[in-house]
Image (spheres, grey):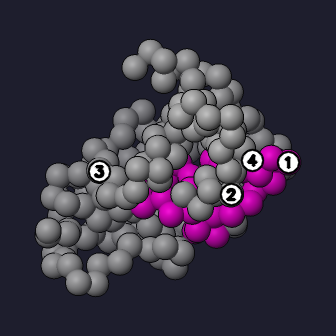
Amino acid sequence: MMQYRFRCASPLGGITLASDGTALTGLWFDGQRHHGDFSGTAVTEQALPVFAQTVRWLGIYFSGTDPGFTPPVRLLTTPFRRAVCEILQAVPYGQTVTYGEIAAILAAQRGISRMSAQAVGGAVGHNPVSLIIPCHRVIGADGSLTGYAGGIERKRKLLELEGSAADEKVLYFNKRSILENERLR
């Protein structure tokens, strides 16, 4: 499978975008843990429409505004990580959710009593499409800014940009709305 790659700048450092030719398959900050591995794959540096849409999204986002749209995304990951990413996509701009809340949502979706918040943390940490799938909006149960593959300082700046982490005060997303949206699907 051909992979396409595009590099762009942001106020928080360089960003690498990846695509399968039609949808975004990766977005990583330079130096981010779990950065996309292009070894063993034919990679072409090419400007694609999905990259133009993503750069437009990033420009709006970094201006401090909710872009109001999402470029096409294709998640090339495990079913569990995909389920976590789908929940992350439902967390509104400027709000946060805890690892435990995501675990509770997954447990409810699967009809089980509990799900490991640590397993959720592993999946969040391996999010292949940072920012657009907003893993930076996940915080610790005590409101702390724990874990972010792009670095805690970037996470702080992203949440401040969205207006949700000034002075370590955060807004929690109501998990009930995600569960209600799931039932309506």
Element on which disc 4 rests: loop
What is the CA distance from the residue labelled 2 to the residue labelled 4? 23 Å
Name the residue carrying label 3: 74
Tell me which label, 2 or 4, sits earlier in the chain. Answer: 2
Whole-percent x and y of residue 29? 48, 69
Is the stretch drawn in magenta largely helix, strand or loop?
loop
Tell me which label, 1 or 3, sits earlier in the chain. Answer: 3
Closer to us: mark 4 or mark 1? 1
In front of the other: 16 or 174: 174
Name the residue carrying label 4: 165
Mark on residue 142? Answer: 1
What is the CA distance from the residue labelled 4 to the residue labelled 1? 13 Å
Name the residue carrying label 2: 118
In front of the other: 46 or 184: 184
Element on which disc 1 rests: loop
Residue 171 colored magenta? no
Q: Residue at x 52, y 39 (%)?
A: 87
